[in-house]
Image: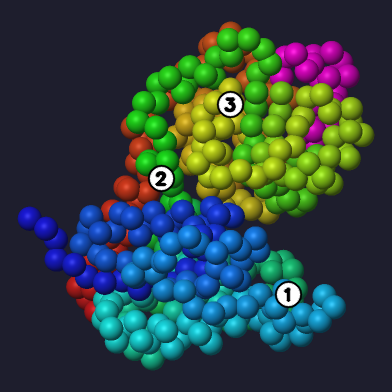
Amino acid sequence: MSLPTRNILMIAFHYPPLQEGSGIYRTTGFEKHLPNHGWTPHILTAHPRVHKNYVKPLTKPAPHVHYTLALDTAKHLAWRGKYLKLFALPDRWASWWFSAIPQGLYLIKKIKPQVIWSSYPIATSHLIALTLHKLTGIPWIADFRDPMTDDTHPYDPLTRCSFRWIEHKTFKTSQACVFTTEGTFKLYQQRYPHICQKNWQVIENGYEESHFPAQTDTWFEKSIPSEPPIVLLHSGHVYPIERNPNVFLQTLAQLKASHRINKNQIKIIFRGIDPQHYLNEYIKKLNLGDIVELKPSISHEDAIHEILNAHGLIILQANNCNHQIPAKAYEYLRANKPILALTDHQGDTANLLRPFDHCYIADLTSGNEIEEQLTQLIGDIQSQTFHQTDLAPITQLSRQYRTEALASLLGRLTQTS
C-alpha cells in the first residue's frame, strides 16, 4: 500500500548543477529517499549562475526544483575587487533572500507544504526559512551541517554578529533543529539551555549507497598491493588552518631522510588541489616531490572510484573543527579501506572512527604520533594483518537510513502542528 504524500519545502543553497563541496549530497540524499516515507520534496535554491565555473545545464530543471536569482557580492557587486560590507551580510549571497521570499510564498500557496526545511551553510538559507515561517506559520526544521558561530568564527566581527543574530532567531523560532554531529548538538545544548530541545536531533551526514558498486569485497582486496608503491589518498580540499598537512609532510620528509620510506614504497596523493597550490612549493622544499603528488579536482563519481582503488585513505581535521566530521569520512568508511585519521583525539571525527579496527588515529599536530600510526599502517598493509570491517554498522550511516530519522521527525512535527 502506497503512503499518503505530503509536501516539504527544502531551502538549500548548495544544489546541482553545483559540483563543488559535499553539502549538495545531504540535500539530494534526503530528496531522493524522502518519497519512500511519504514525503514529496520541493527544492528552493539559488540559480546556478551564482556559482563559479557555472556551465549552463543541457536539460531543464525538474518540476520540483525552483531556482531564483542570487548574486555573489564579491563577484557581481564589486568594483575593482571591493564591495560594501553591508551587501555581504550575513554572507555574500544575501541578495538571494529578495528573490527567494516571493518565490517561496508562491510555492507555499501552490503546494501547501506541511514543513519547511533549510540547510546551513549558507546563513541566508536560514534567513529565508525564518521569514517564510514567520509569514505562514508552517513548521520549520533548521539543519546545521556545521556550527554557525563560535568565539572566533566567522572571523569578521560584524559577520559573526549577524550570524549570531540569525542563529539565536533560528533556535528561538524553529520547531526542530538537526545537527550532523554529537559535538554540535552538545554545543548548542549548552549555549541555549532555556530553549525547548524536545525536537533537537542528530542526523549524521552519512554517505549515498548508490554511489558505490554493488560488489564491495573485491575493493577491499585492493588495499593489498600486488606490487609497490602503497598509494595513500587524501580526497578533497586542504586548508591552512582547518586541514593543515604541514606536520604530516614534515614527518614524511624525516622518514624519507632517514631512509625509512622512499618513492618505491609509498605514494601520497592529494586529490582536489591545483598543482600550483602553495603546498607544491613546500613539498619541493621538503624534497618530497617524488613521494607526494597534488592532483586537480575530478567529478564525485571519479573521486569515489579513486577512493576504492587506493590502498589507504587520509583524513585531516584540526581541533578547531572538533564539532565537525568531514563528509568524506563516511565515504571512506563505506569504502572499507585502512584510514589514517590525523585529527584531535577528543573530536567528533576521532569518535566516529575509533570503533573501527582499520582506522589509525594520530594528532594532526604531533609528528611522533603521525610517524607511529603511519608506520603501523604501512606495515599492516604490507603484511596483510589488518581486518576487513563488518559493513553492518557502516550501513546504518547511509543516507537511506538517515532519511528514516528525518522522516520520523517530520512525522512528529506534523502530528503536533
The percent position of residue 398, horizontal first and vertical second, equals 38, 44
**Between discs 3 and 2, the one toward the N terminus:** 2
Q: Is residue 317 above or below residue 376?
A: below
Point out the image quarter for the C terminus.
bottom left
Label 3 to label 2, Cα distance in Å? 19 Å
Q: Which residue is mark 3?
A: 310
Q: Measuring 54% from the left and 26% from the top, which residue is drawn there?
A: 309
The percent position of residue 321, horizontal first and vertical second, equals 64, 53
Q: Measuring 58% from the left and 61% from the top, which residue is drawn there?
A: 55
Residue 207 falls in which quadrant of the image? Answer: top left
**Between discs 1 and 2, the one toward the N terminus:** 1
Lateral position of residue 245 relative to residue 395, left or right: right
Instruction: In the displayed orientation, state which residue is furthest to the bottom.
Output: 135
Q: Measuring 14% from the left and 66% from the top, which residue is drawn there?
A: 4
Instruction: In the displayed orientation, state which residue is furthest to the right.
Output: 285
Q: Which residue is mark 2?
A: 208
**Between discs 3 and 1, the one toward the N terminus:** 1
Q: Nearer the viewer, residue 61 or 262?
A: 61
Q: Nearer the viewer, residue 400 or 169?
A: 400
Q: Is residue 20 above or below residue 213?
A: below
Q: Is residue 126 visible?
A: no
Residue 263 lies in the magenta-colored region: yes
| Residue range corresponding to the magenta coloring | 247-266
Residue 287 falls in which quadrant of the image? Answer: top right
Residue 296 lies in the magenta-colored region: no
Lateral position of residue 347 relative to residue 178, left or right: right
Q: Which residue is mark 1?
A: 74
The percent position of residue 199, horizontal first and vertical second, equals 34, 68
Under tag 3, what secondary structure? Answer: loop
Label 1 to label 2, Cα distance in Å? 33 Å
Give the amino acid type for the residue marked by disc 2 in the picture: Glu
